Image (spheres, rainbow, N blue to C red):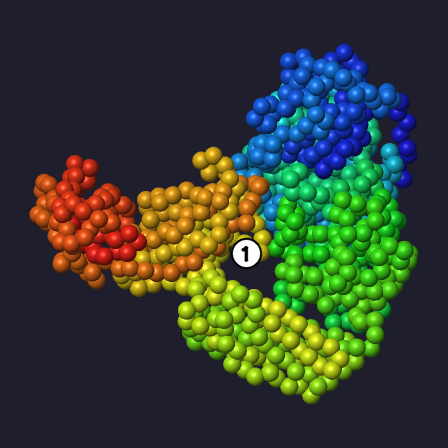
Amino acid sequence: MKKALVFILWVIPIYLSAAPFNGEIMSFRQPDGTWVDVKLFGTEYYMRAEGLDNYTVVRDSKTQWICYASLSADGTELISTGIKYMLTKDSIPKLKSTVNVPKHLSISAKALEQEILKNKKALEGEDFQNHDRKSEPGIVSGEIKGLSIVVDFSDEPGTLPMDEFESFCNDMDYSNFGNNGSLRKYYYDISGGIVDYQNYVFGYFRAPKTFAAYDSMHIADGAKAILDLALNWIESLGFDFSTLSINPDGSIRAINLMYTGVPKAWNEGMWWHQGSYTDFSADGVRSGKYNCSIAYYPLSLATVVHENGHMICHWNDTYKYYDQSGPDGIGAFDLMCNYANAYNPVPPNPFYIIDAGWGDVVDITDYIGNISDNAEDHTYYQYRNVNDTNEFFIFDNRSKTGRSTYIPDEGLTIWHIDRLGDNQTFHHQVYLVHANNNIEDNENICFHSGLNTDFNDNTLPNAQFYDGNPSRLMVHEIGPVAYTMNYALGPEEAVPVIKFSYINISNDDNSDGLLEPGESGNINMKVGNFGIADLGNATITCEAVDMNAGYVTVNTAPKNLESIIVQENIAFDFNIAVAAGIPIGKVITLKFSITSEADTSVFVKEFAIGNPVFMANQQISTCSSVFYDDIGRTRNYSSNADFTTTFLAPSPGQSVKAEFLSFELESSNNCEYDYLNIYNGLSVSSPLIGTYCGINTPGTIISTDISGALTFQFHSDEALRGTGWEAIITCTGINRAENHPGDNIFEIYPNPSHDKVYVKITLNDSRNMRLVIIDTEGRTILHYHIAGQPVIEINRNTIPSGNYYIQLWNEDDLKAVQKMILL
């Protein structure tokens, strides 16, 4: 073990981190040399400070004093009042009568989003939306080689010897400053010995400018300038960068930049962060992600292990970036949410551990009996949603020992996982079920005797899946907190437990596995008995329920089963027919019931009529689809989305029609944040019909393009998502001249023409009609409202020579098309 260092130094903040702050107290220097204590709230992307008296404070850009803040009239900026803030933890906080502002001031939600986007771009580069933080976790194993660079400055010289940093990164028995091991030891422990993460350590690199000079730059600019110089310095020493662990894109997997100096303000200048710098390359590899952390007394693990979780494991943050999203519900039970202790940070959540390949998973979906769950043994118990492989529960006994010493509670933790979820919403990817049913209280989160000993579909909290269907999970007799916790799964009595599962649709009329108007098909199901007693004399029935039940006919009589014995699965199907008159997009609901002398079990399944199409980069030929945003009805659409979908009419003479049933995107002036553009034709080069956001629904849109196509372009920014949209895609009308010449409806003369062109309408009533001129690429050139005029003169001055089509419309009905040739 390395000998303990003896330094007598003034103490500076030790919880400096790029991880989230939720009221942690830190000290900052005022211009006269005194120190004040403030509370920090936020993340590396945006941070707000309050005094100990709960008034928001800012660093005054003119005087450099930390002062009380007011809010700008438009809510987008915190402004210094000029009233100096002077409180410390050793003083008695007193309300300042001269501060005539509310406590806890914060900028608006939209301004917060824009600040976060601006800082993410500064930290991670122009391509920040495509960085790995949105990627799925994956297997991480074996030896990983990272790079650590230690930097100091003429005005902030390094005081720790370089071998201290080498030990901090790599010594398995490191314990200085109260740290529980090194960076290497942390990942060795949480991976169960599967990962050996070591760093090449270089330094001190003396930066050419002062720390104060770099700290005066915009956030991350100083750190990136130093990183470039330091990497070139290391290359001049002859280091082979190809010996480092490399990502599939050729970037270095992990760079740890450690430097001396304390930033004068939060989230500015040289504030610690994770970022991306890609301008350096050598030995066939390039720089990529990097992490900043402190290089002075006392060194602490928390920031480094959290940010390396991003770099070497591709883990997402599980805390919330935006205040309006509500509590994260996880707190200090997950390294990627809140590390709990600077020197002995907690492990990551069990979902990340399992996906990294570091844990043994025991499937308890069909298990009935008792579980003895040992803490810290890398064994996890998983209960699956048999109808959705992305959703499951994880059970993990947590005890305040080892890496979990500083978790806020102990006992049985129950995690609700949905791989397709998002921790920036209430439909989480990773969620920790609260035994006390209070998401804001993490100190009574674990299940154990004396608090909450049962978890099923009818308890609070309940075990239902995200779609509201029962999971049939039954946990009971959860014992007291102990290193080995005992609990029971399955029914408490000797009874059958019936679970339905949906398989698919078969034998539908066009064999596409979907239900469409006028079709019949078999709904294939499975029913199993996972109880501890046989089920006898059971009858299975199927019925349509809810508001659209009148469109459905169930053609199969109830099925009688002699029995379903324990652990038996029985497949069955019901044939249903959907009425031809049911509108596309309607949702039918089928209720399956199995009834016996002992009990009745029910399973409800919804089916959308028509082919579901989700927003993506695609071209689709259809006249019978339900068109959704990229997620669908159950959740808000994704952040950072950029998709284009074109709908083509399957047959000549048809035009695509989109009828929006619901619509909600983030609202903003000029739709500058989230928007849906709709184009009249085959691409985004076609004429723009409109740009839509907020609840400004597009209504009904029909293509007037010669191709009959509509193109939809969707963009969303980082946050503030809506519920998206649901639209019905059908086809209508005729739009090709060869199929609908219209000789008896209107006449073009002269045609071809070198000069003026006239259109003569031969209908008796043309008051509601309009002419649309389109080119051969489907672009709309001119519109004319006829308003009863018998002859329309075409303004030839604005139309170049070429071939065109003139369409005659009666409101939304295309009546005729003729070709026009301009010479």
Residue at figure coordinates x 18%, y 47% from the top left: 788
Q: Where on the picture, by quarter, is residue 541?
A: bottom right
Q: Residue furthest bottom?
A: 562
Vertically, is 306 above or below 624?
above
Residue at figure coordinates x 34%, y 53% from the top left: 702
Q: Where on the picture, by quarter, is residue 305?
A: top right
Question: Which image quarter holds the N terminus?
Answer: top right
Residue 232 visible (yes or no): no
Residue at figure coordinates x 79%, y 29% from the top left: 25
| Left or right of residue 521: residue 342 | right
Vertically, is 785 above or below 75?
below
Vertically, is 43 above or below 377?
above
> Closer to the camera, 95 or 512?
95
Residue at figure coordinates x 15%, y 39% from the top left: 796
**Residue 236 locus on image (x, y percent):** 63, 30
> Closer to the camera, 515 or 618?
515
| Left or right of residue 187: residue 274 | left
Residue type beneath disc 1: Arg
**Crowd tier of the residue under label 1, counting other residues whose Cα lies within 10 Å: few below 14, some 14–19, many 20 or above:** some
**Residue 368 locus on image (x, y percent):** 80, 72
| Left or right of residue 157: residue 411 | right
In the picture of the structure, the residue carrying the numbered disc 1 is 633
